[in-house]
Image: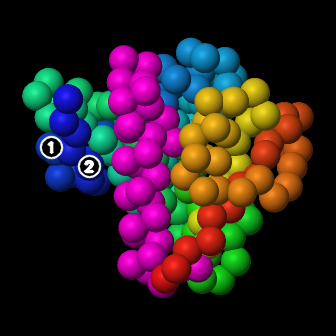
Amino acid sequence: MEFLVGEIASFNMPESMVSELLNEVYVGEKYVETEVAKEMFKYNEIKKRGIVICAVEKQSFSLAGVVVFVPYESPASKLAKENESEMHLLCVNKNYRNKGIGKILIKSVVDIAIKNGNTKIILWTQKIMKAAQNLYEKEEFTHINNIIKNNREFLVYEKQLNA
């Protein structure tokens, strides 16, 4: 299986597919409440965060995964400082899990961050998202802190970059 990675516009597919995938994974797997997701996963809200990167399966042209690169300057950036960035909403379609999509999407974010001169990428993930934590640690992110947001505990990770 081969995957293409880029911004959704480069694939000429409906932006609504990103929202659908995020809802399918985050709401369907009970990481986010339906009411919260209605606003949070509208594509216009997602793209305000930063650069929306998609992984598409080459043969079927199916959306396999998505992630958002969030620059420090973005209003959505919560923890990054100057010369740092954040990674938001990493999401892999359940039909494409364990095929390296998460790793490909993370690499895309790292590449953009380095190109932008960032020295660090920060992310946070829910405590119950063990598979995500394992992936981040394999990709050399370090758990640095925990925070509480919306009555949920999140683990904060960072990755130092050689910009």
The residue type indicated by label 2 comes to Val
Q: Secondary structure at mark 1?
A: loop
Residue visible at 53% across and 70% down in the picture: 71
Mark 1: which amino acid?
Asn
Q: Main secondary structure of the magenta part?
A: helix
Assess disc 1: are there few (<14), some (14-19) or many (≥20) residues with their C-alpha within 10 Å of its C-alpha. Answer: few
Q: Residue at x 45, y 76 (%)?
A: 114
Find disc 2 in the rendering and name its residue: 5
Q: Position of residue 94 (x, y in %)?
A: 43, 19
The answer to whether 120 is drawn above or below residue 82 in the figure is above
- Chain part drawn in magenta: 90-119
**Which quadrant: the N terminus?**
top left
Q: Name above or below for residue 72 compared with residue 152.
A: below
Is 93 covered by the magenta stretch? yes
> Which element carries disc 2, helix, strand or loop?
strand
Residue 120 spot, x, y in % from top left:
61, 72
| Residue 116 placement: quadrant | bottom left
Q: Nearer the viewer, residue 141 or 80?
A: 141
Tag 1 residue: 12
Q: Residue 110: percent from the left, percent from the top?
A: 46, 64
User: Splitting the image into 4 quarters, where does residue 37 fall?
Assistant: top right
Q: Specify which label sits upstream in the sequence, 1 or 2.
A: 2
In this rendering, is residue 62 above or below 91?
Answer: above
Q: Is residue 20 visible?
A: no
